[in-house]
């Protein structure tokens, strides 16, 4: 299988192909490699025997996440010179680096735009200079905004907040730069991803991890609005497998592909109930005012991923949640870390953040 996957991208590289066991090693670069998804993805390519390099500016990552065998440098994707140096000779780039705090983006549009859009411009410039073969951009379901769920890739992108707008703008930029400068590109659109190594002390994102970190400390979960917002969660390995295919299968140039299950959706209330069961916790959540621009229902179709990538959901929600519980138990609960600036201190700012209630 490994050989088959790699024949895809290697067929676009003018080198002869060896038998699968002696296949060429790909040179892969992962931005945001010390983060949650980037570190799992880098680990997967290291395990396949590829040459893996990566960077992270450490705004949100953890060096402990880095897989052994990666060549890593602390660097910001906005720094074109650094990116050009680091991506020299690279076949395949995964651009995972971002500040991905969607709710906070309503109050901090400048830092989000910088670390979603401008950083994509930086690494794209480097990729073009180095004539990288394929560029995989990690977008987000936030691109669909208040569109009609379950979101399909052929429906218009109508992002609802600065994070979704920056992601969609970065998608357009990716397509434009790659088409002009002769690189293949694929846009990955993941759902909410869960699993070990996810930052669980971030008060601005990762609802399941926040709830678990609080409940393990004997604190009730905090729910914005009525809790009837519907979401889908992907276990990280169920996201990594299709991402690897997006980087290596042939015939995907220019495709936008959702990644995540469509068999199992939950409301935030149901999520809290499942966690309470798994943790044997006496649930009585705090309900607070809904955050501005929060989308009510955000679920995606996986039809295109099934058709193009043979996508399959392997890890059901409960098992994925249990794996985060195990991870947090093993690493200890943590106080929440208000590590990002709030740029617009308006009456709309949730009290949970203003008063640091999480
Ligand atoms: N986790 C999810 O639920 C989810 C869902 C949809 C899309 N995504 C996207 O997947 C990607 C990875 O998300 P994640 O959950 O692993 O987040 P993460 O915060 O764990 O990882 C992102 C990493 O990028 C780094 N970073 C931020 N700005 C950077 C810059 N300018 N230069 C270099 N490094 C920078 C951070 O320090 C962090 O380590 C992001 O692009 C995110 O938008 C994530």
Image (spheres, helix red, strand yellow):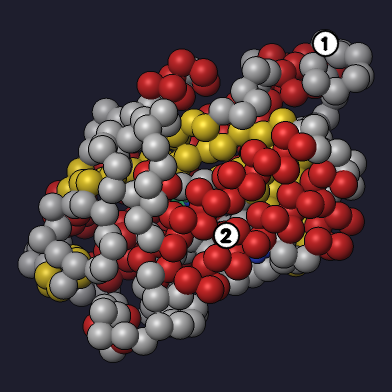
Circles 2 and 1, Cβ within 8 Å, touching? The answer is: no
109 or 305: which is nearer to us? 109
Real-space Cα separation, disc 2 to disc 1, in angstroms = 39 Å
Quarter placement of the N terminus: top right
Residue 350 sits above or below residue 171 on the image: below
> Can you name the residue that lies furthest to the top here?
19
In the displayed structure, 166 sits above or below 350; it is above
Residue 223 in the image: x percent, y percent? 18, 65
Q: Is residue 234 left or right of residue 139?
A: left
The residue drawn where x is 55% and y is 73% is 111
Residue mark closest to the camera, 2 vs 1: 2
As rendered, which of 258 and 174 lies closer to the eye?
Answer: 174
Residue nearest the observer in this picture, 78 or 247: 78
Q: Position of residue 296 (x, y in %)?
A: 21, 52
Answer yes or no: is residue 66 visible: no
Q: Quadrant of ligand 1?
A: bottom right
Residue 14: quarter of image: top right
> Is label 2's Cβ within 8 Å of ligand 1?
yes
At a point 47% along the width and 71% down the height, the residue shown is 109
Judge from the rendering whether residue 42 lies leftward or rightward of residue 91; answer left or right: left
SS of the residue under disc 2: helix
Q: Which mark is residue 19?
A: 1
SS of the residue under disc 1: loop
Badge 2 or badge 1: first in the primary sequence: 1
For the C terminus, the image quarter is bottom left
> Residue sitting at 80 percent across and 21 percent down?
12
At 49% from the left and 31% from the top, the residue drawn is: 257
Badge number at residue 116: 2
């Amino acid at each position: 299988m490994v050989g088959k996957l790699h024949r895809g991208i290697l067929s676009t590289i003018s080198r002869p192909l060896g038998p699968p066991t002696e296949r060429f090693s790909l040179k892969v670069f992962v931005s945001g490699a010390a983060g949650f998804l980037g570190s799992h993805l880098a680990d997967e390519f290291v395990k396949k025997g590829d040459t893996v390099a990566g960077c992270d500016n450490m705004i949100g990552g953890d060096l402990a996440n880095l897989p052994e065998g990666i060549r890593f440098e602390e660097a910001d994707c906005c720094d074109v010179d650094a990116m050009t140096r680091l991506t020299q000779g690279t076949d395949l780039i995964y651009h995972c680096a971002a500040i991905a705090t969607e709710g906070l983006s309503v109050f901090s549009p400048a830092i989000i735009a910088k670390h979603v859009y401008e950083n994509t411009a930086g690494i794209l410039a480097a990729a073009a200079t180095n004539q990288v073969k394929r560029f995989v951009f990690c977008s987000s379901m936030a691109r669909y905004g208040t569109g009609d769920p379950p979101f399909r890739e052929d429906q218009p992108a109508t992002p609802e907040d600065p994070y979704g707008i920056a992601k969609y703008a970065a998608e357009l930029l990716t397509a434009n730069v790659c088409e002009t400068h002769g690189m293949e590109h694929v846009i990955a659109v993941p759902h909410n991803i869960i699993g070990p190594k996810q930052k669980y002390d971030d008060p601005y994102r990762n609802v399941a991890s926040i709830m678990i970190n609080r409940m393990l400390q004997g604190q009730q979960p905090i729910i914005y609005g009525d809790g009837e917002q519907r979401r889908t969660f992907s276990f990280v390995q169920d996201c990594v497998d299709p991402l690897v295919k997006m980087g290596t299968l042939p015939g995907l140039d220019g495709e936008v592909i959702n990644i995540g299950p469509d068999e199992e959706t939950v409301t935030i209330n149901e999520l809290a109930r499942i966690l309470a069961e798994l943790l044997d916790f006496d649930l009585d959540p705090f309900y607070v005012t809904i955050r501005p621009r929060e989308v009510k229902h955000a679920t995606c179709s996986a039809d295109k991923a099934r058709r193009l990538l043979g996508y399959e959901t392997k890890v059901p929600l409960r098992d994925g949640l249990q794996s985060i519980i195990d991870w947090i138990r093993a690493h200890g609960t943590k106080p929440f870390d208000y590590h990002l600036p709030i740029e617009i201190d308006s009456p709309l700012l949730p009290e949970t953040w203003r008063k640091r209630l999480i």
